[in-house]
Amino acid sequence: MPMKPICVTCKLFYRPSRNGVWFLEGMPSGAGWAPYKLWHGDEWSCRGCGSTIIVGVAPQPFSEHFEPDFKRKVELRLEQIWSNPIFKSMTEQ
């Protein structure tokens, strides 16, 4: 079993905080970012500083931007997508 991730700042192990988190990978587009790939993983957090990471991600994305139903797949999971302001702005384009 691989070692749990460690927070560099606090020197503590990250702990699972939420399983089954959807998130978007972005790509540069004009002056901002555009949705590129839809992924699924588990959110872990540091109990010391509260930083979060996503681990346990599959080797392949759930969906990619060139697929005909990519936008629909993102919209169906919009409420579940990791609440990072960058991801939110990407989905509003």
Image: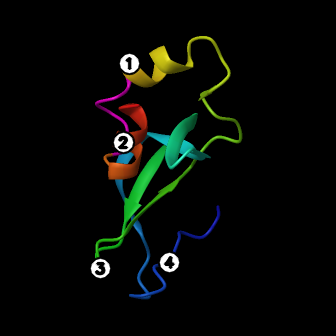
Mark 4 residue crowding within 10 angstroms, few (<14) / some (14–19) / many (20+): some
Check disc 1 and report the residue beneath it.
76
Q: Earlier in the sequence, mark 4 or mark 1?
A: 4
| Residue at the extreme right of the image, as rendered | 59
* Kind of residue sitting beneath label 2: Ser
Mark 2 residue crowding within 10 angstroms, few (<14) / some (14–19) / many (20+): few
Check disc 4 and report the residue beneath it.
6
| C-alpha distance separating marks 4 and 3 | 12 Å
Q: How many marks?
A: 4
| C-alpha distance separating marks 1 and 3 | 32 Å
Viewer-nearest of discs 1 and 3: 1
Q: Earlier in the sequence, mark 3 or mark 2?
A: 3
* Kind of residue sitting beneath label 4: Ile
**Region rendered in magenta:** 77-82
Viewer-nearest of discs 4 and 3: 3
Q: Earlier in the sequence, mark 2 or mark 1?
A: 1
Any mark on residue 49, and which? Answer: 3
Whether residue 49 is visible here, answered yes or no, is yes
* Kind of residue sitting beneath label 1: Leu
